[in-house]
Image (cartoon, helix red, strand yellow):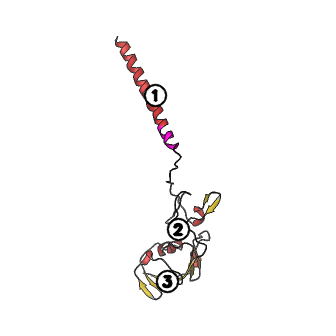
């Protein structure tokens, strides 16, 4: 009799394990059948904008690389930095240790959202702030003074340049 109980208990345990395995594989698969795709995409590491391109509906989508991360990682994500074909144009002078810095020498040709030509800057998205612009030319230190159109600004790295602005950044 004791042998029969052990055999019955073994069958119950085996049956329970098999049911748990079947449920473990069935429920996640059933949840995916709902047709909803996950809107979460893994962040992508980048060094320039060209590394962030997406193909959505067989069309290339330009994506900003900022803080070494692509700012849009899937076609279902909304882009905060939409690419505009008409840029915001302004002037930017950067000084460090009393010397004017040539920004042309510090740019990457594969960055498409921000273009430098001497003191002239073109930004192809209306939401890119000064911190992101300076980051593109290798300035990550935020210890600077900012003047906008000849007047000191306390917005610092959060300043959003406007058409025709003349900006001067002096690093301490």
Tag 1: Cα neighbours inside 10 Å, few (<14), some, or many (≥20)?
few
Query: Can you say whether 27 is above or below 88 in the image?
Result: above
N-term-proximal mark, 2 vs 1: 1
The one nearer the camera, 45 or 82, is 82
Q: Quadrant of the C terminus?
A: bottom left
Q: Which mark is residue 91?
A: none
Foreground mark, 3 or 1, reads 1
The one nearer the camera, 102 or 3, is 3
Q: Residue 18 carries which label?
A: 1
Please give the residue where the numbered disc 2 appears in the rendered image.
81
Q: How many marks?
A: 3
Q: What element carries label 3?
A: strand
Q: Where is residue 93 in the image (x, y as percent from the top left)?
A: 52, 83
N-term-proximal mark, 2 vs 3: 2
Q: What element carries label 1?
A: helix
Q: Which residue is the extreme one toward the left?
A: 2
For marks 2 and 3, give the CA distance: 22 Å
Q: Where is residue 109 in the image (x, y as percent from the top left)?
A: 62, 71
**Residue segment shown in magenta:** 27-34
Query: Can you say whether 122 is above or below 62 in the image?
Result: below
The one nearer the camera, 45 or 52, is 52
Q: Is mark 2 on a helix, strand or loop?
A: loop
Residue 65 counted in the magenta span: no
For marks 3 and 1, give the CA distance: 69 Å
Q: In which quarter of the image is the N terminus?
A: top left
Please give the residue where the numbered disc 3 appears in the rendered image.
167
Q: Position of residue 39 (x, y in %)?
A: 50, 53
Q: In this view, does 68 lie to the left or right of 109?
A: left
């Amino acid at each position: 009799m004791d042998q029969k109980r052990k055999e019955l208990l073994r069958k119950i345990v085996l049956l329970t394990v098999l049911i748990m395995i079947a449920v473990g594989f069935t429920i996640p698969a059933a949840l995916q059948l709902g047709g909803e795709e996950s809107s979460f995409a893994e962040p992508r590491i980048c060094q320039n904008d060209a590394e962030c391109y997406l193909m959505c509906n067989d069309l290339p989508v330009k994506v900003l690389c900022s803080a070494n991360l692509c700012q849009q990682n899937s076609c279902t994500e909304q882009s905060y930095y939409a690419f505009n074909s008409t840029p915001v144009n302004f002037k930017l002078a950067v000084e460090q240790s009393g010397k004017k810095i040539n920004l042309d020498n510090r740019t990457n040709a594969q960055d498409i959202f921000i273009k430098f030509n001497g003191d002239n800057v073109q930004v192809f998205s209306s939401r890119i702030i000064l911190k992101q612009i300076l980051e593109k030319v290798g300035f990550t230190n935020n210890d600077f003074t900012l003047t906008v159109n000849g007047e000191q600004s306390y917005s610092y790295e959060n300043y959003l340049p406007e058409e025709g602005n003349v900006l001067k950044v002096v690093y301490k």
